[in-house]
Image (spheres, grey):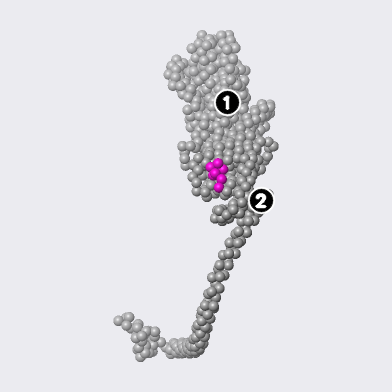
Amino acid sequence: MNNFKLNVEDLNSSGFNLDLYLQQTNKTCNLNEILLFERDLFEEISVFQSDKQTLVYDNYNKFISATNTIGKIKYDFIKMEDEMKSLASNMESMTIFYDSITCTLQDSHSEISRILKIRAYLKNLQFLIKLPDKLKMQTQSKKYLEAAQDYLNVQKDLYHYCHLGSFQIIQQEINYILEEIKTNLWENLNCTHTKVKELSYSVNILLTLREPPKKLADKYIRNVEKQLTEKVVEWNKPPVINLFEYANLGVKLMEELCSFICEFDQMFDVINIPLKETKKSLDRMIKGLMTLFFESIQVKIDSLPVSIDSTKISTALQKLFRKIDEAKAVLQEPEYMERIVDIIVKAGRKQSRYHLNELKNFLDKSLLNIRQTLAISLTSTRISIFRKTNKLLTHLVSSLVIKVQEALEDLTAFIETSQLLYASRPQIRKSFCIDCVREGLIVGFIMHLKASARSFCSTNKNYHTLTLLFISKICLEFDAKYINVLLKLTDKLLGVETRDKQILTTKDELCVGMRLAAECVLTRYVQIQGLVVSQMLRKSIETEDWLHCVEPTSVRLAIKRVLEEITAIETQVCMLNELGSQPENSSDPNKEHSTYFRSTANNQTSYYLSACRVYKPLSDKLKKTTGSFEFSKIFIMAGIIKISLKVLVECVRLKTFSRYGMQQLQVDLYYLQIHLCRIISNKNLIQFFLAETLNSAMNRSLNPSLINESGVKFICEER
């Protein structure tokens, strides 16, 4: 119902009802709205009338134009019909005229054909009569090919008229001249100085003159092989030429060989005679020449100075590779491509080894200079030594990285894909990029750095302790940052894919090795410094007369010197190593010493027994120094102090103490504790060894009696 109402009131609908629309409008609209609607409706009607009038005029013009076109076409058809009738009349008259001419000339046509044949016959006879003189002139001017072609052109006619006496004389003269030509060509072919192009010219003419193909082919192959072999040998002889000229000469040799092969195939394939033995001889010649060619290239590459720019080598090899690649369709042997690629890889390996040796020499010289510099700077102040060592470390590491980058940039000339055709071959990518550069140069240099660091751990040589710290810091720098930097740079420059883990040395393997080398060097440092301090402690015990000591009033001078040495070591370690983590159980050394002192004084026997029970498992732990190695000042100093205190315990066990001797040792041990606890955080370790030392002295004392705690503090603090 609603749809019907809309259709009735819609002006554009086919079911529009005017009366209903007017009624609805009167009900819903006021007078102004109706007037406005009337004005709009009047404007629309005017537009529609104007459009209608325009369409009428346009259609009228089209009708007029169509009428004119139809009239013109009708006129053209009438005119064309008249012209076709005239043309048909002309063709008919032409046919009649042609028939009349044909009938008139029918008799003379056969006569003209006969005269033309006689003329051609006479011309051939004239050519045959003049041929001997012409062949002599061509022979004298060495135009052998033209002479052979002229002879072949009249050979049938000579055979046709051979029964006539005059033509027999002409045939004899021609044969004599041809024999002379063949003799000259054979002499030219036998001459060792004849160029390959002239040899091809002679062979081609002799084949044209029906000489034995097998004999010609064998002679041709032997002469060309001899000449090209001599050229390849001369290629590598002095005077020395640059690589670009050398490569250009190699390209010319390849072009000459390929030209010979193409001409040989072209000449001997035309005669359609199977020459299997000759083909085998040709293949042997090509293989021998190419073998000599590649050996000459390898000798040249091997004789180049190692410091030559890799760009020059790669450019020269690229020219040779491109020419061999172009000639592979002629040579028909894929092995030659592999040979030139193998030469390129060997050249790249040679350059990689050169750069590796340069890096090794640079590292060794740098380490030697640093050892000398550090030895000279030992007399400087702590601040100046600290600045100098850090400056030396930064300079050395950055110099090594720059040297490696320069070597990589030089070697990338071998695989610049935008210029080099061979760079995209898989063998180049694997053999050169991975084996020579990544594994051979970068990994090889890192392994040499690790081996150089481990060489400082040798007990046969004495190195300054600051040098050992410096070497360990270099290893840690490479472990933390530069191994990853160098490997990423190498993979990026060379386009190495790291997905094949079986053939690549990973970053983790190198980092672990470098970290172990740093650990080895620091272990050696701890051993040396621990030995120095231990000897001082041992002398302080062995040189003292413990049975005749007086009552202690101060700390012995030897103990103070020991602490001065430990402080100097701590200062040295702080230059290149971080502080390290502090254990959570750190506490005040004075407070802990009080507990240890009271325990020792009040219950000497029970404390000694408990210490003995704890000593074995703890001493076993002390031997495992590499289990959880930490590169920090606290860890290093702890290792030195462990060794020193262990020696102290063993030395005390060998001495006998009087009452005052044991009390003097008690004062010394207390003095050591309050200072050592400020250096390392493992207070339990220090207390264990000192308690072990004091208990050993009490067991070896004739009159074991300790000073009270306040007395020991007073003596140590006053002095």
The answer to whether residue 343 is above or below residue 15 is above
From the viewer's perspective, is 409 left or right of 682? right
Q: Which residues are magenta?
A: 210-217
Image coords of residue 110 (percent x, y): 54, 70
Instruction: Kindly indicate the quadrant of the structure image that contains residue 254.
Output: top right
**As drawn, 643 above or below 443:** above
Residue type of the residue flagged with mark 1? Ser
Return the mark for residue 455. Answer: 1
Q: Residues within 10 Å of mark 1 (few under 14, many from 20)?
A: some
Q: Nearer the viewer, residue 134 or 219?
A: 134
Q: Amino acid at mark 2?
A: Lys
Classed neighbour count for the residue bearing mark 2: other residues with Cα under 10 Å, few (<14), some (14–19), many (≥20): some
Q: Nearer the viewer, residue 258 or 250?
A: 258
- Depth check, front residue: 57 or 712: 57
Q: Residue 537 at what x, y percent from top left?
A: 57, 17
**Horizontal and vertical percent for residue 125?**
60, 59
Q: CA distance from mark 2 to mark 1?
A: 89 Å
**Is residue 409 at least partly visible in the picture?**
no
- Residue 249 located within the stretch drawn in magenta: no
> Which mark sits nearer the N-terminus, 2 or 1?
2
Q: Quadrant of the N terminus?
A: bottom left
Residue underneath mark 2: 136
- Say which element carries label 2: helix
Q: Is residue 317 above or below residue 703?
A: below
